[in-house]
Amino acid sequence: PNVIPPDGNTILHVFGKWLFEAIQLSRQGFDEGTALAIKVVSNIFNSKRETKFVNTYLASYYRSLQEVLIRDGKTLIAAILYSRDIFSRQMEGSRILVQYYIYAITRIVVGNLSSEPFFVSKGVRSACCTILGQIFCLPKYFGNTEFKLKFTYKEKQAAVKNYQTGTLSSSATPPPKSVFEASTYAELKPHLDYVLLEALKNEQSVENILNLQQLCYAHAITYIDDPEFARNVISTICGKCVTPKKWSPGVIYSGLKTVGRMSFLFSQLGKSKELAKKIISPLCGFVKGLCQDLFRARGGVSDKQKVRLAVQTFKTIADWVTVDQWIVEYPDRMKIVLDAVSIGLLGPKQKTVTEVEPESKKSKKDKSKKEKEKKEIVVAPVVTSSKKITRAANELLVTLLNRMGVFPSERAGATSVSSLVSEDELLQDIAIKAEKLGVMVDDPKQFLRCFLLAEQTILSVVDQPFEENGPTVTVIFRDCTGKYSWQFRSAFLPFDERSVPSRTKGHCAVEVPISREPHRTSVDQLEDDKFPDIYEAIDQKKWPFDPLEFAADMQRREMEYLESVEYNLNHSITLEMPPPADPYVSACKFQQGRLLLAHLGLISLENWGKIHPLEQTQNLFAQMKILDQVPERRCHRIAVVNVRRGQRYGDFEAQDAGNIDFQEFLCSLGWGMHIPTHTGYLGNLERNAQLYGEYAPYYADHKCELLFEVASLMPNNPNQSEQTHKSRLLASAPVVIVWTENSIDEYEPDFGKSNKAHIVIQHLMPTARINLYRVRLFLKVAMADNKIWGPEYKEVLGPCLEGTVLSKDRLGALVRETAMEACTVVEGSDAKKSVGDESQYALRARVIGDIAKKFRTVEPLESFYTSIFTSLPSKFVIPMNSCTPARADRALRSELPGVANQRGSGSQPRRIMMGYGRSNPDLKKNKGKKKKLAAEGDYDTDGESERKSKSSKSRRKKHVDSTFEETPLAKGSGGDGSEEIRSAKSTTWAVADGKMSSHRDAPSKSGDTKAEKPIIVAMSSQRMQGSENPEREEESSPVTRPPRPSRGPVEEEYE
């Protein structure tokens, strides 16, 4: 027979009268029975969620709860424990109990019952936190809506007047009015502020404190229009963290993280500069004390905890000093921060003794006595700072130097914190401008020089001689913080004379007017009779000629010649300026760059040994491009799925744009990013509008990038029924946001292989158009006990807690913050990831260190300076010859790409491994087993083996080990439009999702099958340089991805 199980109304029709009477009679001595009745009734309403209860039963239940919530003892405990989900259950009329629950929770958590034995229980107080998470948004959403239910006389007699204060909050200042005197929802906000803040101050349970931190964080975001509560929360958490013995180390660690995350509210906090100034000083003092205490031999769990606290404190300080330029207005705070940095880097300052007091006779006797008793000398161990603390302090310093006041940039916005200028772009520009001027540039590489500065910065100096306003120098800096580009031009004139001709040069160019006739004086000629003696002497001398006529003839001929040559004044005798020097007449084109380095002192004799030239081979530029792909910020990809009513999680084909609420939710997650032109993090999306659409939500701040891969924004492929391009992306995302129109209580997450967490959102009452949403959190693996912080500490995802109810206007921000924290937690708990909590600065520093080891040139003094003045050797290449993906086509960039192990462009390829380029010893033992090695992740270096298969279809069906994933390599152009250059039998390696894949290329068009080019290590997303054709996947051969080789167990530091 078809038997219909009883619903909630049937059960209450049979037992309801007895249960409600047992609750409402409230007889003395029957507390346990009354509590049991409350438990039974509440379980009926909770377990029969599909039942639409009769209004009579709902009214009886609400009336019973009203009476119980103003009582004490076990009945109140039962009401709190077993009705904790009443406001998230969509029960009609349940909000009439809001005042009663706030009254009861205030008494239990901070009021007159807070110290009673019954209410100290962790479970009771945890239930109070759960209920607060469901009602804290109601004053924001309903505003000035009035309460219709009035407080009865009986309830007024039963209610306690001074219920808001107790032994735990004796010094607190409660709201002036009782919660029952509030006439609107908005008047409940002071009561919620009070109970949350006082609970945060006085709670003793570790789990409840962690939940309260996140709940206060969510409350602060919800009411950020009135930022006083947010400021109080930040000050309270900071004060609790730095005060000894207030919180346990694990709670302090979580509190420091929460304070750092709340820095993104800086612009909305009102008196934000005063608040930042207020909290920075105690944080610096706290971290200085930790660093000074740890400057010794370390060991044990306690020292590990202190190390992590110091590291997190430096990160929190970095968050607050980089969010704005407020600290430059307070030099004293800047000095305090830098003092903490110096102690973290160098250890505590050594005390210097300036005056030595004379020793008395007694002290001399004591000293001599101690020296006699001393039998052996004990050498103190060498004490060094913790590596983790030193790294964190250094990251704070470089963040101050490189990030403060520059994010977001004026032109690049928030999508990029690094320059997008590249060497090949500059050299191409030189060739184009030279061609316009009629100059042929045969060897562009002569305009570029690469150097390694102080083992941590890569300099690319490019001479640009054909600029409109004269030669310029562009310098590209690459360090652990990012990539930066600067342009330099020599300036000899003052700035106000830059646009006018040189006055000195103009004065020298003016010719001096010169007469064409000799200068003649006006002197009277003497008569001949004035000199009789002279003429008489001449007459007495016998001459073979007439001297007077000879002299006259000579004078006449001279005058004729002078007149013919215009007295030698037929040309200008003005002193002319020499023409400007042309520095580019020689084969060495590194001229302006040499001057710049010399003027900066980088190539001076004092800095010799600190700057080294780099071998400008093809591999160097390939590795530099890979360095550009290593992100400067944490990058997370989050999937977003819209599940319509009646659909399942994996019904991607039936998904559409969703209702208006879902679309507005997407807009609140991030900015609408145009995928084809985006320069920031792309996750696993490709620049293929046919597969992945044109837009996706994107969000970035100074320390992280978030990309939301929304299935409904991707077009369906009519040739695929299962829409594998969507399912593959969503299955590989660590965190998934699920917007469901089905019952959230019946949701069963399908995590697959890569999903670690699902954040599920449901509209509470869509038919009533009440824009309140319930959020649930599902984790693939429950949060395990932390070995460092102890068994009581379990990581809490927030600010959205399990079952939290949020209003629409703050839903996007709160879910985004929760998803960001979930990505950090699940990635940090993934044991397979070798990087762990290693920052992006450390990842980039490792890549730079590998480049330095492989391409640095150590030369004698004379050779170093000779290379500055001579042209580059022919073996060096230009960066345009290197073939790597564009920066925008970065894969999951939290993984560190490998670095090739070869140096010269003509060198024989070597075996490489991810991380440090170490060779695999298994290859030496198994040279003859190439197929087996390929399946295990190694590859053969002889360049002889090629994949042989009859068709791409048979290659796809070839067995691949289940550990690996088939990922085709795209052919043709890369994501940035640059054409890939591949040579015969060269090996291209791609890194995607932490795995490495290889592909043997076909012979090049030149036909030279003997030449081999070195291995190129490149990062990619799902495939190398995203293909524009969706059918390209079928044309390319499958590639096995060997697993990342283990780097050995990570040694725990006791620093």
Image (cartoon, grey):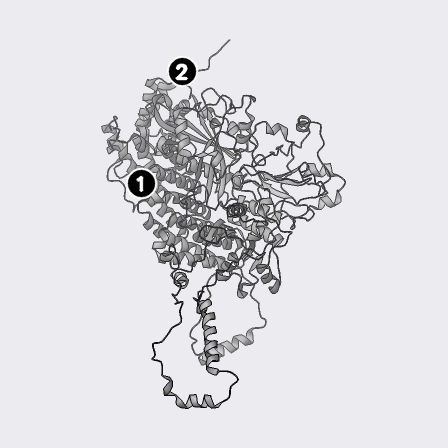
Give the x, y percent position of residue 806.
Answer: 37, 32
Q: Nearer the viewer, residue 510 or 590?
A: 510
Specify few, some or many for label 2: CA neighbours under 10 Å numbering under 14, 14-19, or 20 or more.
few
Residue 194: numbered disc: 1
Q: Secondary structure at mark 2?
A: helix
Left or right for 1033, reference 261 = right
Type of the residue with mark 2: Thr
Type of the residue with mark 1: Tyr
Q: Secondary structure at mark 1?
A: helix
Give the x, y percent position of residue 76.
Answer: 35, 32
Residue at x-position 31% and y-position 42%: 227
Say which of marks 2 and 1 sits in front.
Answer: 1
Image position of 740 with respect to 309: above or below: above
Residue 559: numbered disc: none
Q: How many marks?
A: 2
- Answer whether residue 28 is visible to the viewer in this image: yes
Residue at the extreme left = 153
- The quarter holding residue 159 reads top left
Q: CA distance from mark 2 to mark 1?
A: 42 Å
Q: Nearer the viewer, residue 922 or 966?
A: 966
Give the x, y percent position of residue 763.
Answer: 39, 26
Left or right for 412, reference 1046 = left
Left or right for 947, reference 80 = right
- Answer whether residue 1055 is visible to the viewer in this image: no
Residue at the extreme right = 928
Give the x, y percent position of residue 379.
Answer: 57, 67
- The quarter holding residue 1013 reads top right
Q: Earlier in the sequence, mark 2 or mark 1?
A: 2
Left or right for 1022, reference 401 = right
Specify few, some or many for label 1: CA neighbours under 10 Å numbering under 14, 14-19, or 20 or more.
some
Image position of 51 with respect to 544: above or below: above
- The residue labelled by disc 2 is 10
